[in-house]
Image: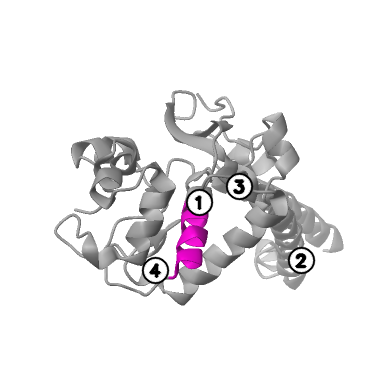
């Protein structure tokens, strides 16, 4: 199960992310890298338009 | 040729935007994590204890309560269970008194360099038993230590042990006499009792299993 029930003492967003295989690491990489792919294609479009 | 000139990888703007994005996101996330951590490690209040609200670190007045350590099926490890009130050194300590006592205990713990041999909350050495859950060690509960030391209650036995550890060698080892005074010993016992009530996500692992296997004593093997 990718999402597991929250079992920590104090509820917290990062605590929720750390339950099971859906780890903080995967979340952080998603948050950082997905927009970078958008930045890549955006820049590519700009370069081609300039040319 | 025309494709090569349009390469994004050589574009300074692309790297600049990426770096700005990563830096800004990291700053926001780290700030968020900092505040989240502060919330997690903040000590609860006496009111929380009275209302039964569980905090990772309970208020100093937790020394007025019975503390148990039970396996939680939901969480997959043992968790401290704060039970009914019980007198600590024959009295109930007010929030102010309890806080002062715990502070004295912490200072004594530092002054006597307990972590030169012991471990507390993951810090220290593994020469002597782990003190994180020392208060819950069954050896103090089933009367072995209390009988050996000749005291009626666990806290009195622990305080006496701390004042004259060289008289009571355990686990084939002997703690040196650190010339701990009675007041310091009482404060240290309060410090240890409070520490045992901290929810450490099951650390040290298999505490009760090991304690049973070794007939008391935590990691003293």
Residue that numbered label 4 is attached to:
B114
Task: Tell me which residue sits at (44%, 23%) in the image.
Answer: B73
**In the image: residue B116, left or right of residue A32:** left
* Mark 1, other Cα within 10 Å: few <14 / some 14–19 / many ≥20: many
Residue that numbered label 1 is attached to:
B195
Q: Give the structural element (helix, strand or loop) at label 4.
A: helix
Q: In whole angstroms, how far apart are the C-alphas of marks 2 and 3?
A: 38 Å
The answer to if B183 sits in the magenta stretch is yes
Task: Tell me which residue sits at (29%, 48%) in the image.
Answer: B150
**In the image: residue A43, left or right of residue B43:** right
Percent of width and height locating residue A22? 55, 36
* Residue B154, disc: none
Circles 4 and 1 in contact, beta carbons < 8 Å: no
Percent of width and height locating residue B158? 38, 53
The answer to if B98 sits in the magenta stretch is no
Q: In whole angstroms, how far apart are the C-alphas of marks 2 and 4?
A: 47 Å
Give me the chain letter of mark 2: B
Screen quadrant of the C terminus of chain A: bottom right
Residue that numbered label 2 is attached to:
B20
Kindly report which numbered mark, 4 or 3, lies closer to the viewer in this rendering: 4
Q: Which residues are magenta?
A: B181-192
Circles 2 and 4 in contact, beta carbons < 8 Å: no
Q: Give the structural element (helix, strand or loop) at label 3.
A: loop
Give me the chain letter of mark 3: B
């Amino acid at each position: 199960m990718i999402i597991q029930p929250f079992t920590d003492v104090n509820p917290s967003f990062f605590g929720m992310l750390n339950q099971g295989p859906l780890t903080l690491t995967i979340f952080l990489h998603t948050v950082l890298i997905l927009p970078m792919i958008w930045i890549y294609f955006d820049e590519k479009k700009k370069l081609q338009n300039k040319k | 040729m025309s494709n090569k000139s349009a390469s994004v990888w050589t574009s300074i703007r692309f790297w600049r935007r990426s770096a700005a994005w990563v830096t800004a996101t990291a700053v926001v996330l780290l700030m968020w994590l900092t505040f989240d951590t502060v919330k997690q490690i903040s000590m609860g209040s006496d009111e929380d204890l009275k209302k039964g609200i569980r905090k990772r670190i309970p208020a100093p007045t937790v020394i007025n309560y019975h503390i148990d350590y039970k396996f939680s099926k939901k969480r997959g490890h043992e968790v401290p269970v704060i039970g009914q009130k019980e007198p600590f050194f024959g009295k109930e300590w007010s929030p102010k008194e309890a806080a002062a006592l715990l502070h004295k205990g912490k200072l004594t713990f530092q002054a006597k360099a307990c972590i030169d041999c012991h471990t507390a909350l993951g810090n220290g050495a593994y020469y002597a038993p782990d003190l994180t859950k020392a208060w819950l060690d069954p050896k103090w509960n089933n009367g072995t230590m209390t009988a050996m030391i000749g005291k009626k209650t666990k806290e009195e036995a622990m305080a006496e042990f701390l004042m004259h550890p060289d008289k009571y060698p355990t686990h084939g080892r002997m703690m040196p006499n650190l010339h701990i005074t009675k007041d310091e010993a009482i404060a240290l016992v309060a410090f240890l009792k409070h520490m045992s009530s901290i929810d450490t996500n099951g650390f040290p692992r298999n505490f009760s299993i090991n304690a049973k296997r070794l007939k008391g004593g935590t990691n003293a093997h």
